[in-house]
Image (cartoon, grey):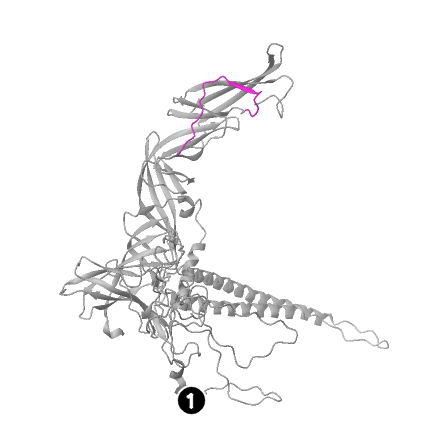
Amino acid sequence: MTAGTAQNWGSTLDSVVVYAQGALCRRLARGSVPPGGRVRVTGLPRSLDPGSLRARVLGAPGVRVTEARMEVEAEPLGPDTGTDIDAGNGTGSRDALRREVERLRDAYAAARGRRDRQLSLIEEVRGLHPVPPPREPEDPHRRTPVDAWLELAEFVDERLAGLHTRLVELEQALLQLEHELTVAADKLARASTDAPPAHVETTVSAVLTLDGTGVTDEVEVELEYGVPGAVWVPAYRLTHRQGDGTGRLVLRASVAQRTGEDWTGVRIALATADLRRRTDLPKLRSIRIGRRQPAPVPSGWREPPAGLADLFAGYEAAGPRPVTTAAPAASRTGSASGPVPPPPPPPAPQGFGGPPSGLPVPGSAYGSSPDVYGGAMADQARPAPAQPAYGQPSPARPAAPSQPGGRPRGGGFAGAPAPRAPAAMAPPAPGAAAPPPPPPPPAGPPQPSGAELDYAALVLSGPDEPGGRRGRLFPTSPHDAVAADHRRRAEAVAALPLPGHAVRPRESAGSFDHRFDAAARADVPSDGTWHTVTVGEIPVGLRTEYLCVPSVEPTVYATLVLSNATDQALLAGPVEVTVDDDFLLTAALPTLAPGGVRRVGLGPAEGIRVTRRTNVNESTAGLRNNVTVLDHRVHVELANGLARPVTVEVRERVPVASEPDIRIEERADWTTPADGAGTEHHAPGTRVWRVDLPAGGTTALDGGYEIRIPAGKALVGGNRRS
């Protein structure tokens, strides 16, 4: 299919689902179905994963997609195609920014050279000093020309003053150019990658084949594809008013993407799932004992045609092609001159048993598995590809040696044999061990990979290829190297430093996956920097409580107790807390599961004071005073200096006995906190007082416990406990 046989349709990016790494984009295209049914949808990014492309027709039951394939076209840019830099805001195309950086770099190098030359001149002038002529022993004493010395010193001072003045000007100009170069380099690093590279314009399009009869109206086609180079982390903004039992928690996301296309006015959804996680189920094959065995599954491999080696006999008899440009032959004593040998053949591509480097593994959410996305889909069903006319495979024929992954060792798709060793091979050295024999070929026909079964992408090797490749089909993708480079640069966005208190969604989501849909459309340029996107408001239960542990620190801390009553988890991330329309602080929100309750610390509460006093009495008890009683008394006083009532939680800790002859008896009205799902974890022996204090009120709490131990023993560290 050529460019003239397909009708071009423009497309617009409608929605994007950003996963933990990578994104799934959805484009819409509209047009009338041409008579041939072949259309070309343009506007796709360069970093698109070819194995993730799928298409379907919306709202037209009589039309379906029977083939979808990606094509890349490149053409040189004209001399006046670039976009100049806008002097007002410093924005422009990447090509113009790159030219500006190169110009400033050259100017900076020239300015530094001028500064260095000025420094060398200063050193030369500074080294000027009077040198008296040598005096012979018989010569009489001569008078020193003081006037000449003074004139030389005056000349040096005057010359140095002018040179230093010029040096100050050169250093200022150098600093200015360094600043401009830093700003331009930063703009280039932050510029959007949604622009063609220098001097070349690359067009990525999806070529679709539509099957529909009697359709005259316009149809709408949906394209879905995966791209790397997109990450996100959650962020929150919490608004609360004191005395109110609810709050507004706004979920925001920091999104960074370098996919090669700007997301302008798109619907964004955020997911915690791994886009490249395998989704195929393991298969356990049965082991059968007996003569009757199940028929082998057809692999798609076909026998190479007979007489393939004789097909190029006439081409070889014609002799080598004339050499147009010959390198100068190196003369050597005793060596015969001969024709220049042809360059060595390029190494056969490796890894056809699996997906190319940088692509998802088969069976992933947008991998190359034909039962998930495939290159050609028709209403979620892909027809079986036609088999090439190579004849039927012979089960009894020994297969060619294959490499790991099922690819024939010779690189050929049609059962190419292993390459033969060169005829002129140096004999092994005397006494050297003989090389081990090659392993026997595995039984059965070769099992080609998915790339080798993609018949539309196979290319017939010509007569100039090595002998093991001529006349055979090989998968080839001329744009794989360039696309891999685009994907590699796009995936570098995963190494961006995270904002403060931010946590990767895969780390905070745990074993569950969640999705959050933004309420409004947003813009995210392809510049590889963080951009804030507002997702929506989440209703949460909220109350203010005060917490203190006076045995550790005589300070009362203010906390917000959040309860999640929704069916979605709140992932860990930074939360900006605003109380009574005043920004308070940015705290770290822990992961809050549905139905969970968590605390967020707000810092010390200066309006509430707490004091603690302890008293320990040691006595004996028992029939023969064989028990030592350690009576610990705790007295806590609270004073509320705020203008509103508060609830204060006072925490104490009771010792936990690890031996059976030690008993602990509590004498207080405190309670034991409950540990369970969705609640805060407490250390063993924790006891809690919950006190409601009115505005300006005070209260006192008394508690204690007794430790009973045998009289002949003592506690480690002393019997007195504070």
Chief secondary structure of the magenta span?
loop
The image quadrant that residue 305 belongs to is bottom left
User: In the figure, 366 relative to 606: above or below?
Assistant: below
The foreground one among 534 and 686 is 686
Q: Residue furthest front?
A: 291
Question: Is 158 part of what is drawn in magenta?
Answer: no
User: In the figure, 634 relative to 388: above or below?
Assistant: above
Q: Is residue 548 left or right of residue 210?
A: right
Q: Secondary structure at mark 1?
A: helix
Residue range (magenta) = 657-677
Q: Residue furthest top?
A: 623
Question: Is 661 part of what is drawn in magenta?
Answer: yes
Q: Is residue 297 visible?
A: yes
Residue 13 x %, y %? 28, 58
Task: Give the position of the C terminus as an image quadrant.
Answer: top right
Residue 617 x %, y %? 59, 15
Task: Give the position of the N terminus as an image quadrant.
Answer: bottom left
Residue 189 x %, y %? 42, 60
Which amino acid type is marked by label 1? Ala
The foreground one among 111 and 252 is 252
The image quadrant that residue 44 belongs to is bottom left
User: In the figure, 681 relative to 438: above or below?
Assistant: above
**Residue bearing mark 1:** 317
The foreground one among 207 and 162 is 207
The foreground one among 649 and 125 is 649
Residue 142 x %, y %? 80, 74
Q: Is residue 188 visible?
A: no
Tell me if mark 1 has few (under 14), some (14-19) or many (20+) residues whose alpha carbon lies within 10 angstroms of its own: few
